[in-house]
Image (cartoon, helix red, strand yellow):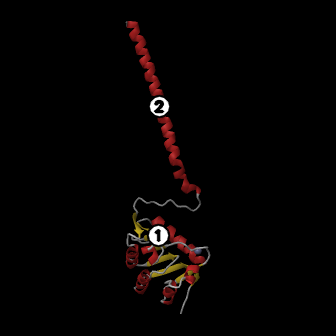
Amino acid sequence: MRKFDNIAHDRLRHIDAMYYDIRNRFVAFAAIAIFLAFMPAARATDIVPGVEPAVVGNARVEVMFTPEQDATARIAAAIAGARRQVLMQAYSFTHDGIARALLEAHARGVDVRLIADREQTEKMARGQVPGLARAGLPVWLDGEHQGAHNKVMVVDAGTASALVVTGSFNFTRAAQHKNAENIVFISGNEGLVRAYVRNWQNHIRHAKPLTIH
Ligand SMILES: [Zn+2]
């Protein structure tokens, strides 16, 4: 009986050792799998030239979807809240209310500047861009792309309240009422603001001023 106990004990020890071996191998395998899973994400920003990792920890991001939410009112409020500057890139721009908000900001001394797609501006009968230029707003037309398709506002770059607004939403009534669109409002992220300002500056280099008297 004693001998049997010893054999049983040895077997148990052997099973124990096997169990620990398997467990250790599993832990090592899991650690490598986790490492590999996160590696590509960590390296993505390193291997694409010019891509800056944007710190989003302190950013405040609001998202709106149309037609169910009033993105136009939020855009107008962002323009009304501008203290120094509004840099804008527009593709289609037919919304009179947004145009009015820009002119009001311009009238109270905010540095409002607009880059608009050349083809859209020239072909849209009810476009707001020529009227904005006529009213004295600094406007440039970008004809260097198949579409200058950005829909962007950068409000008060370089200040604590800097805001980036972008999404699929064109500055049109159709975007608000007829289409399915999204738009995000991002504040509290200096790196992102710098990236959008730099992009705005890249387009202004080849865009042509639109002056209408
Ligand atoms: Zn351009």
Residue located beneath label 2 in the image: 24
For residue 19, above or below residue 85: above
SS state under label 2: helix
SS state under label 1: strand
Pinpoint residue 52: horizontal percent, then vertical percent: 52, 61
Q: Calculate the distance from the C-alpha at mark 1 to the C-alpha at mark 2.
A: 49 Å
User: Is residue 53 visible to us here?
Assistant: yes
* Amino acid residing under circle 1: Thr
Mark sitting earlier along the chain (1/2): 2
- Give neighbour class at mark 1: few <14, some 14-19, many 20+ (Cα, 10 Å): many
Disc ID at residue 166: 1
Pinpoint residue 104: horizontal percent, then vertical percent: 40, 85
Whether label 1 lies within 8 Å of ligand 1 gets the answer no
Pinpoint residue 73: horizontal percent, then vertical percent: 37, 76
- Give neighbour class at mark 2: few <14, some 14-19, many 20+ (Cα, 10 Å): few
At a point 50% along the width and 36% down the height, the residue shown is 29
Instruction: From the viewer's perspective, tell me whether residue 199 is left or right of residue 187.
Output: right
Q: How many numbered marks are there?
A: 2
User: Is residue 155 visible to us here?
Assistant: no
Pinpoint residue 190: horizontal percent, then vertical percent: 45, 66
